[in-house]
Image (cartoon, grey):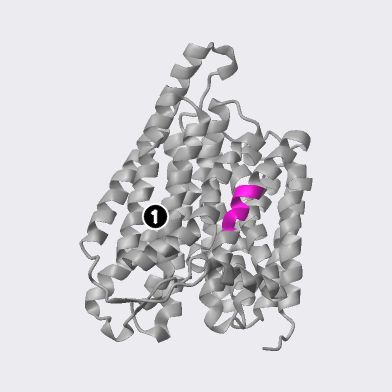
Amino acid sequence: MLIDTSSSSSTDPTATIDDEAQGPGDRDLRLFVFGLFFAFGGITSLNDVIIPKLKGLFTLSYGEAMLVQSAFFAAYFIVSLPASAIVRRFGYLRTAAIGLLTMTLGCLLFIPASGSGRFPIFLIALFVLAAGITIVQVVANPLISRLGPANTASSRLTFAQAFNSLGTTIFPYVGAILILGGLAKVDPTTLDNAALALYRTAETRVIVHAYIGLAVALLLVAGALWLRRNRLQEQAQAETSPLQAFMLLKRPRFAFGALCIFLYVGAEVTIGSLMVAFLTQTDVMAISAQAAGKHVAFYWGGAMVGRFIGAGLLRLISPGKLLAAVATGSITLILIAANSAGPASGWALLAIGLCNAIMFPTIFSLASLGLGTRAAEGSGIICMAIVGGAILPPLTGHLADLSGLRLALAIPAACYLVIMIFGLFASRPTSR
């Protein structure tokens, strides 16, 4: 969905890089890292067009279809800390190459998944793919912040976020054409077991072809990055216990912020995952799945535009108050989407992407305020909180199965309500 990956992965788990050593030769490394942001942002947003495809082929309920996001985002919780250990062992660039190779493996696993015609195999492929993305994310943000002077690090990070948003805008549109263009027109329930297996294999080939193309691209980038693995001089830091990082949860402000990251990612991913199903309803836009998939680009594109608008507003308005305002905007848009009909309902849900734009980095910075030298540990905990994208979508899906898509939107609305309260709480002056 998508999340603000550049802030979520801002842990600096292992090394320091000599800023003075950076020169014009590192410009190509920055381009590589921008490409990484583009790639893992776009690949993550592809889940939104895979879900309706798999839901139709395997006759899944909404709750079952949302297991796609559970398998994907569970990797953040499971792999984040091991990824930090990999960076400590191999360094930034080698670890980035390892992450890209893991992503390549995940893409290639769609081949046996299609051949098996079994939904759980697709979930395994998605988990491996997400594990690679998690490894790359743990590397990308601290690396781009060090590839140049310290006083321009924020500018580089903002630029990297724009590449991430560009990926989340382009990939769903292209994915809708490639994957949803041939959405199943046969009712799988009318086929016997043998015919059903052949049918699923044939229909999932479009997914396989898309991910094979991604695998080739990722492999080329991994090779190019590996050739530059010795470009940086890195100095290992002392090992730290993960349990020490969890002690930060005793701080109310940080714990509240980590909870809001969990809720924000869950809400953002949930809305993106249900978007195609919502827009295709006869009382909303009544459009085809392929057309709805193309509309998902407006949801993520809104986040890209909102980042630039929010960057300016944050210079004029306190972060906590602005966070409360955009969370209120999200709640208002959900109420409009759930209680109106026609295109207005669909566009209201799509417009939530604009409100989502500043949420992750703002929650992240407000939660981390005052952590000082423990900021990296706090960032690791926040990265693990992205697991909200694995838990809240299936819960919302089950509610949609019971009560319909409109009522199910109450769950992300409740998430935004908590975020609004955090914004008001964090806008108060705080002692050190």
Query: Foreground: 10 or 176?
Result: 10
Q: Residue at x 34, y 60 (%)?
A: 96
In the picture shown, does residue 403 fall above or below 91?
above
* Residue 378 falls in image quadrant: bottom right
Q: Residues within 10 Å of mark 1 (few under 14, many from 20)?
A: many
Q: Main secondary structure of the magenta part?
A: helix
Q: Is residue 144 visible?
A: yes
Taking 196 as reference, is 112 left or right?
left
In the picture shown, does residue 327 fall above or below 72?
below
Residue 95: x and y in percent read 34, 61
Q: Is residue 173 visible?
A: no
Q: Which residue is mark 1?
A: 39
Which quadrant would the C terminus be assigned to in this image?
bottom right
Q: Residue at x 54, y 50 (%)?
A: 73
In the picture shown, does residue 367 fall above or below 166?
below
Is residue 282 a member of the stretch shown in magenta?
Answer: no
Q: Residue at x 68, y 33 (%)?
A: 282
Residue 301: x and y in percent read 52, 57
Q: Secondary structure at mark 1?
A: helix
Q: Residue at x 38, y 65 (%)?
A: 87
Q: Amino acid at mark 1?
A: Ala
* Residue 205 falls in image quadrant: top left
Residue 62: x and y in percent read 65, 36
Q: Which residues are magenta?
A: 386-391
* Tally of numbered discs: 1
Is residue 388 a member of the stretch shown in magenta?
Answer: yes
Residue 178: x and y in percent read 42, 37
